[in-house]
Image (tube, grey):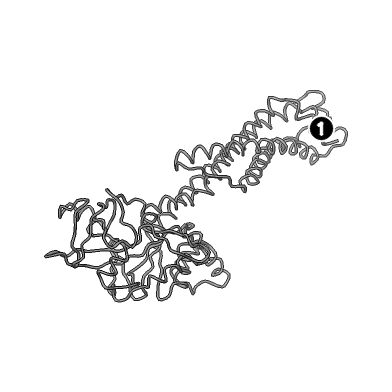
Amino acid sequence: MIFTMIKNSLFRAKAQKFLAFITVGLSVALIACMLNMTLKIGDEVAKELRGYGSNIVVLPKSNALSVEIGGKEYSPLKNEDYLKEADLHHIKEIFWRNNIVAFAPFLDGKVKSGDKIYSIQGTYFDKNVPISDENDYKTGVTQLNIFWHVDGEYPKDDSLTSVIVGDRLAQKDGIKVGDKLNLANHEVSVTGILHGADTQKNQVVMSLKLAQILLDKPGLINKAEVSAMTIPENDLSVRARRNLDSLDSVEYDKWYCSAYVSSIAYQISEEFPSSLAKGVLSVSQTQSGITQKIQSLMGIVSIIALLISSIGITSLMSSEIYRRTKEIGLLKAIGASNFSIYLNFCLEMVVVGVIASMFGVILGYALSFALFYQIFDSFVGFSFMVLPLCVAFGVLICILGSILPLKSVIDILPAKALYGRK
């Protein structure tokens, strides 16, 4: 019988039910939009920040003893040790291998050119690095430092005759594309001028193979920089970074199996012999800060939407109870308990809430796609956990909005209600 009453009630007072539908639907649409963007925003922020360079650096263990002062890193034992180029494939063979977007090795040094001394750097540009189960994997600075821009073209990997020159060095020495340089009695051609770099703006950048020949360091590198997809840091990752031994076994397993920058760096150190990988804090902390602030803002907006829509449902429910006072009085007269009347009204609102939430989720997905594309110029995708969460939010809105009005049901006396008296 109660289901018959609910069905009949839903098709009566269509204006009020429609207003309740709109109130819940729009609120759920906003919450669904916020949730879908929030659950994806961390990955997109990490993707955007990758354009500013690596977030993990791999150093020889002796070189890892460094101090950061005023944003600059000082390494008292720098150049005392080297890494082997042949071990680079281990970076892409850890547990989080799919999170490794790109990496590049670097070998720095100085060479003579007549009466001048040039600072040079060897690296990969777009080199094939065979790894287990992925023989066609390519990586280098073209993927690692996407903000670099070259007037001209990059040298070919393993080229012994082509280099690019940092823009500041080119301006100072009047070097142009097509010029010839004599580096340690080895003639090379300038194929491009590099813009947008940091330390490289005063360097001659070349293939790693050429740098190893000029510096007489066959098969060796100073360091490797890695760009990895990571999740924002939290208390667990900060504790692990400060003192890994402070974690118990459960915390350690959770940290190790999460894509924090510190856990990925730790696993690289485990696989890469004689190396110590560490996160670049300026990048990882920026990612964590931006992501947490955006998520907090979206959470506040969702809570406000929940409260406002609940107030709207409260008003509509009060109006509905007033309109159906005689019906409530009749139900009480034939023996219906207050609880059964509460249940009847609540189930009506839950049905409206579930249906409105389904439409609200669809609208929320559409809004999140439009906003995400406008902000990041990419599509956000579906987060399927948004659907059950938003349906739960819709039901919660209806329940919260019904609590206060339903209290007035207790005060309705059958005789007064049936005779139309207040």
Q: Quadrant of the N terminus?
A: top right
Q: Is disc 1 surrounded by few (<14), some (14 to 19) or many (20+) residues within 10 Å? A: few
Does residue 43 appear to the left or right of 163 in the view shown?
A: right
Quarter of the rendering containing residue 284: bottom left
Classify 176 as above or below 25: below
Q: Nearer the viewer, residue 329 or 108?
A: 108
Question: Furthest residue to the top?
Answer: 420
Q: Nearer the viewer, residue 100 or 415?
A: 100
Quarter of the rendering containing residue 281: bottom left
Does residue 99 appear to the left or right of 182 in the view shown?
A: right
Classify 106 as above or below 304: below
Classify 402 as above or below 323: below
Residue name at image x 18 percent, y 62 percent: 182
User: Residue 154, position in %: x, y?
Assistant: 31, 54
User: Residue 361, position in %: x, y?
Assistant: 61, 39
Disc 1 is placed on an element classified as helix
User: Residue 265, position in %: x, y?
Assistant: 44, 66
Does residue 236 appear to the left or right of 307 in the view shown?
A: left
Q: Quadrant of the C terminus?
A: top right
Q: Amino acid at mark 1?
A: Met
Residue name at image x 88 percent, y 33 percent: 334
Residue name at image x 45 percent, y 43 percent: 376
Name the residue carrying label 1. 5
